[in-house]
Amino acid sequence: MMSALLTLTALMAVTGLVLLWLGRRFERDEDSLVERINALLPQTQCAQCSYPGCRPYAEAIAAGEADINQCPPGGDAGVQALAELLNVEPKPLDESHGEHKPPVVALIDEDRCIGCTLCIQACPVDAIFGAARQMHTVIEAECTGCELCLPPCPVDCIDLIDRPEPYRPPRPDQAAAVAPSVIPLRVA
Amino acid sequence: MSTPSVGETLHAFPGGLTLRHHKQVACQSPLRHLPLSAHYYLPITDRRGQTAELIVVEGQSVRRGQVLTRARSDFDIVTHAPTSGRIGSIVRREGIWPPGSWTDCIHLEADGLDSAVEAEPLTEWFEHDRYRLIDRLRDRGLAGLGGAIFPTAAKLRGDWGPIHALILNGAECEPWIACDEMLMRTRSDEVVRGGIVLARAAGASEMVIAIEDQMGEVGQRLSDAIDTCPIDFPVRLVRVDKIYPEGGERQLIQVLTGLEVPFDGLPQDLGLLCHNVATAVAALEAIEAGRALTERIVTVTGPGIRQPQNLIVRIGTPISELIEAAGGLTGDAGRLILGGPMSGNALPSDRMPVNKGSNCLLVLTAAQVERVQPVMPCINCGECVRVCPASLLPQQLFRMIEGERLEAAADLNLFDCIECGCCAQVCPSHIPLVDWYRHGKAARRLEQLDQRRAALARRRHEAREARLEKEQIEREARREKRRQKLAEGSKAQDEIRAAIERAKRKKHSDPSAE
């Protein structure tokens, strides 16, 4: 009887110590959670979520300060992915932060640009190329369409255009109505 | 690696379909030249989206075979003037792919004289270095005429081991296309000699010509041509069973050798090289006659065309002219298809020009393309798995793409799909499977592009943050330095003030001394 009690107590003590050590050794890594959240964000760096960039927003989500539905470029799909990662209920995008729009890129009207460099300073990904009193241009492949260069421009010479995308055939179930079953041809 | 025996014994590839052929429809009329047209349109962007480097200017007079664009590498295909005339401006024409696209073309206004540049034949070509032959083929604008338009020079020269055998692909397996059959029937000598040119350029030690067993007199003509060929080179003729898609490069290699080309590899990795028979004839023209590739045979056929036939067409001719030459469309014509019925593309108009890969213009009737049965849910019957020549699981791929699980579809080897259309052909639920795969492949590529863009944006943002932080620290350091300087400066002023004080005190004490 006594030996059984002692054995169990010893066993519990050892297990407890092992668990304590494991808990210390493999501490839940807040940084890696931030990294994983950040990997799901679109990296537009547009600050529409009211944080200064994607990583600060990821940190705020990890700390429980921000909700998962504040990223308009990510859209509902982004919210869904975050909900899956964090194991919480997905919710619709919070429209107060902006609406989900098709991807755009900035284009500088070179005739109107005065070379003030204000947009270069505003660009979060250094995608604008130029120098003082020289014409500026947007590196299309690196522009995230964050729109942060628009407000500082004193001559309003930046336009947003649809981002050129490679052709993607439509889903056959959605294309059924438009798919050309009979193509009008010139009959010779 | 041991060299595989090619065509000694025939093997089978998985799946495939036996289709009824309609080649005779176009082969009943003799092969003839399409009359010269007044306008030609030559696209300047290639399939990779690269724009060619033009070496002619607007208003310049050119002759047939004159070079219009420069090749910067083996992967560029040189464009030549298809006839003599005047170079017009760059115009936008409807493109063949993607549907609804527009492509920039050189507009050539023909003068009707059809005068050609002086041909430079390369005599005694069998004695020349193979790289000289490859350069020649590149400069004469050679590209795969089977439909893929892959630059011939890039296929012949590359980073792989020695090529053992050249396979000349005459197994034209699409049911309606007959341009290769017509070519082998009318120019069998040139097919054999042209094949030897390519084999020589590839450094191969033997050549195998593969044709389908139901091509009638083609086999006899080719074996006669092999017997009478003046060049001493081992050539064999192999007849393969008529089963679709046997004309596919990977399928044909599997039939002839029993070996599978690795999904991430090339036939060259097996010491084999596959070229189309029409490419061989064009290669012979480029070497022996010294002429550039400016024309090809196009099959104009189908129940929607009045006089189906094979035409020799200059590259750049608008498709509408082919239809006109073949007697025009019948009243019930409903769809234009470029390529075969199984793997071709529907054309939105007849304004686009013929390119080097346009092997067949098929016109189907409205009744044929009308969807009679609605699309039903997949019943998991497995017919698609049985016919898939790439050993994929088409029903699983469909399910993954339908559920937007593109990564899972890619893991099921979606990108090994050759879009042959066998699965869609046998599907009892009439699911347009190939359309799904085309959508899935493009959507997956876009998804990966988005991931790459996000990674790039993140890298650049982090680099910018680091730079701003560094600048901030430097600014702080400068400010600190200034403050110190200022503090030092105030010490100096204190000393001056102290000196003045001392002087004053001295002055005050002096009168008392008086």
Image: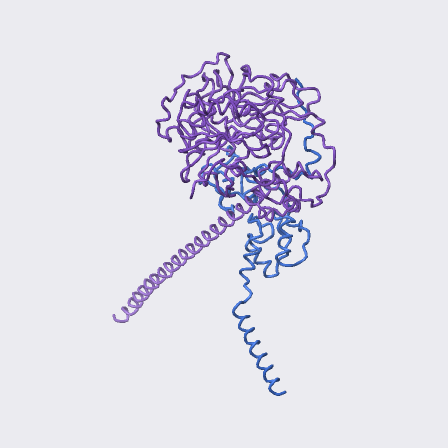
Chain colours: A blue, B purple
Q: How many marks?
A: 0
Report the front residue among B91 and B108: B108
Residue B87 is situated, as x and y percent measured from the top left of the image, at 48, 19
User: Is the C terminus of chain A in the top left, top right, bottom left or bottom right quadrant?
Assistant: top right
Residue at the left extreme, as displayed: B514
Which residue is outermost to the top? B113
Where residue B495 appears, as percent x and y from the top left, is 32, 64
Question: Which residue is the extreme one toward the right?
Answer: B373
Q: Position of residue B380 (x, y in %)?
A: 69, 46
Of B448 and B304, the residue lying toward us = B304
The one of A57 and B459 positioned closer to us in this rendering:
B459
Q: Is residue B478 above or below residue B238?
A: below
With respect to residue B466, does B197 lie above or below?
Answer: above
Horizontal side of B381 relative to B140 (left or right) equals right
Report the front residue among A170 and B35: B35
> Which part of the image, by quadrant, shows the N terminus of chain A?
bottom right
Q: Quadrant of residue A106?
A: top right
Residue plotted at (50% across, 47% down): B456
Quarter of the image for residue B97 reads top right
From the viewer's perspective, is B139 left or right of B359? left
Whether residue B451 is visible, yes or no, is yes
Task: Residue B415: give x, y in percent of width and height.
Answer: 56, 42
Instruction: Indicate the quadrant where residue B490 lies.
Output: bottom left
Residue A78 lies, with reference to residue B153, above or below; the image says below
**Residue B41 in view, yes or no:** no
